[in-house]
Image (tube, rainbow, N blue to C red):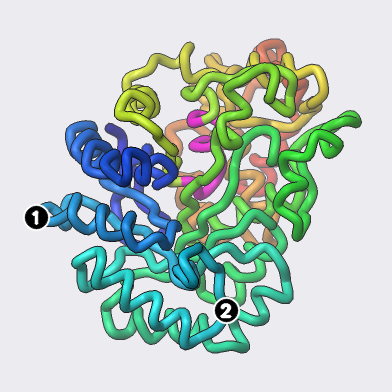
Amino acid sequence: MEYRELGATGLRASVIGMGCEGMNEEHCGMTAKLFDAAEQLGINYFDLYASDPALRQAVGDAIKGRREKFLIQSHLCSVWKNGQYLRTRDLEETKRGFEEMMALLGTDYLDVGMIHYCDAMADWEAIVNNGILDYARELKAQGRIRHIGLSSHNPLVAERAVVEGGIEVLMFSVNPCYDLQPANEDVEQLWNEEAYAGRLTNMDPDRQRLYETCQRLGVGITVMKAFAGGDLLNAELSPAGVALTAHQCISYALSRPAVSVVLAGAHSVAQLEESAAYCEADETARDYAAALASFPRIHWEGHCMYCSHCAPCPMGISVADVTKFLHLAQTQAQIPETVREHYASLPHHAGECIRCGACETHCPFGVAIRENMQQAEELFGF
């Protein structure tokens, strides 16, 4: 298993995390099986957005005696009312739901307390004005949640929450189809066939800016919907018209700035093992670039996807890393110190580029790499 720092939280998380989608199967009997497999595979991070008390109890039973082996990301504002799930912005309902959740999980703290499912600006304002954000801050001050998170599908809302609300962990939908869609307060537009009917070119700039803002501010991203609910794995269902493998989807998500964990939903131990096998896969199995370049309805033109197909550089420059730091620096009036330090720590820099153009002949997306190297040299000074 591979591990990454989760933003600036100090938590070290497995790059493959576990979603809770399949845990309630077999009358929640699947829960213990998945946690046993997760421990064996080295998966130490899981998300629990579901509010069903039976499932929360099953998770509590599964982690009993091994709580310290897992990092828990569980959701505030996801409550069980009248026998069904409810997303609430009522402070008292949120408080009751939190206390019930903690009792069922049998723990006195969450590693990440995730404010649940905020896709609209008015909803974010309700979270602030109704005292939900202040409550999360109180829980953090008490040590009952270690870090405050927020889940969203809307890059504009997510960026506002990250910048204004002190959000430390963002749960966000990341995959090569959703990344082309503009911000929308209706999440169903992300998988609406009509949204992919026309020619789509390059990543939505609001999404790109969100990832770069999170990287700059030290906000870790945990990824949901990396497989688009499984649609990307099926050529007939895929919005792109081409199927990807699970490993390609995971590799794509992990290549985005600030991403630390891909939360893989699993309906069986075998599915969880397949996702975890990413860490043992070779570069050919992880490579998503050729597949993305073949999408019949989606195009990347001149936009770096950080896929490293440009390698090897005769001067040893990691072109993908230089380009990523260039993009991070270009979003600010002044270069953030952390970006400058990370760029400086690279073994070779843009100033060493001899403009041979070998990289551009290998790039599947027609990126003007030599121009990027010149811009990086001018911006960073070497």
Secondary-structure class at tag 2: loop
Q: Is residue 73 left or right of residue 109?
A: right
Relative height, residue 282 to residue 172 (above, below): above
Which residue appears at 56% of the width and 41% of the height?
A: 225
Relative height, residue 56 to residue 25 (above, below): below
Which residue appears at 58% of the width and 63% of the height?
A: 117
Camera-side residue of 191 and 141: 191
Residue 132 locus on image (x, y percent): 51, 82
Residue 178 locus on image (x, y percent): 69, 40
- The single residue placed furthest to the left in the displayed view is 65
Q: Is residue 184 magenta?
A: no
Which residue appears at 37% of the width and 17% of the height?
A: 281
**What quarter of the picture does the C terminus occupy?**
top right
Camera-side residue of 317 and 32: 32
Which residue appears at 31% of the width and 46% of the height?
A: 28
Relative height, residue 310 to residue 192 (above, below): above
Q: Which residues are magenta?
A: 250-259
Residue 33, quarter of the rendered image = top left
Residue 169 locus on image (x, y percent): 46, 61
Relative height, residue 214 to residue 196 (above, below): below
Determine crowd level at label 1: few under 14, some 14-19, many 20+ residues with C-alpha closer than 10 A. Answer: few
> Callout 1, which amino acid?
Gly
> Callout 2, which amino acid?
Arg
Residue 43 visible, this orientation: no
Secondary-structure class at tag 1: loop
The residue wearing badge 1 is 65
Residue 20 locus on image (x, y percent): 40, 47
**What quarter of the picture does the N terminus occupy?**
top left
Marks 1 and 2, Cα distance to the nearest angstrom? 33 Å
The residue wearing badge 2 is 89
